[in-house]
């Protein structure tokens, strides 16, 4: 079929807004966050020194649920969020069950001993072998312990993230 209008010519360029929205959704879905949680992180990023977009990614990466996923204790981010909320995760030896908890440099993140033989944890460890590792984290799968060596940098984020589009989206 031919598109209506001048001999079927169609404007297929997505509007700036459309491009920005798509990128925001891409990044939000990558971290498996609801809009409200994502917006809270964006607003926090705005208040920090430096580039808002980079700050946003830094905050998202430092979330405990993301770190648990990055360490390979969970096969998906949704699963890692559940591990956190069900009290399977210790940060510096203390139980933390808040998915949005921000890890700091030097923090130790470990899976509670009683949780280590869960099937999904063992599956995640297998999956982890094929996944790209995060240079800012160190992990020992024998003891299910990870350490935050440093904060992630822009190089640690997927290259397809155009975070400036997210900033433009929210600054309308």
Image (tube, helix red, strand yellow):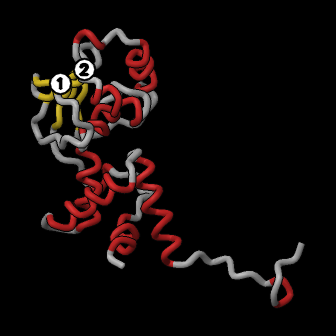
Inter-mark Cα distance, 2 to 1: 6 Å
**Which quadrant does the N terminus fall into?**
bottom right
**In the rendering, at what x and y percent does residue 95 appear?**
15, 24
* Contact (Cβ within 8 Å) of mark 2 with mark 1: yes
Residue placed furthest toward the bottom? 6
The residue nearer to you, when weighing 8 against 152, is 8
Q: Is residue 109 above or below residue 65?
A: above
Name the residue at 20% across, 60% down. Answer: 44
**Which quadrant does the C terminus fall into?**
bottom left
Residue 8 shown left or right of residue 68 in the figure? right
Rendered image: mark on residue 125: none
**In the rendering, at what x and y percent does residue 47 appear?**
15, 66
Q: Residues within 10 Å of mark 1 (few under 14, many from 20)?
A: some
Name the residue at 46% across, 70% down. Answer: 20
**In the rendering, at what x and y percent does residue 21 appear?**
47, 67
The residue nearer to you, when weighing 75 against 131, is 75
**In the rendering, at what x and y percent does residue 16 appear?**
50, 78
Assign a secondary structure to mark 1. Answer: strand
The residue to which callout 2 is attached is: 111
Name the residue at 17% across, 40% down. Answer: 103
The residue to which callout 1 is attached is: 90
Q: Residues within 10 Å of mark 2 (few under 14, many from 20)?
A: many
Instruction: Report which quarter residue 145 is drawn in.
Output: top left
Assign a secondary structure to mark 2. Answer: strand
Residue placed furthest toward the right? 1
Instruction: Report which quarter residue 7 is drawn in.
Output: bottom right
């Amino acid at each position: 079929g031919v598109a209506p209008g001048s001999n079927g010519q169609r404007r297929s360029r997505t509007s700036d807004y459309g491009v920005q929205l798509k990128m925001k959704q891409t990044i939000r879905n990558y971290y498996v966050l609801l809009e409200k949680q994502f917006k809270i992180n964006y607003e926090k990023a705005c208040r920090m020194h430096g580039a808002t977009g980079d700050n946003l990614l830094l905050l998202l990466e430092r979330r405990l649920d993301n770190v648990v996923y990055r360490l390979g204790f969970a096969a998906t981010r949704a699963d890692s969020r559940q591990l956190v909320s069900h009290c399977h995760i210790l940060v510096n030896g203390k139980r933390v069950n808040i998915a949005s908890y921000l890890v700091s440099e030097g923090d130790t993140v470990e899976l509670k001993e009683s949780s280590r033989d869960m099937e999904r944890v063992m599956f995640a460890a297998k999956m982890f072998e094929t996944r790209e590792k995060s240079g800012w984290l160190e992990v020992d799968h024998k003891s299910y312990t990870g350490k935050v060596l440093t904060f992630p940098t822009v190089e640690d984020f997927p290259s397809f993230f155009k975070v400036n589009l997210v900033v433009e989206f929210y600054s309308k």
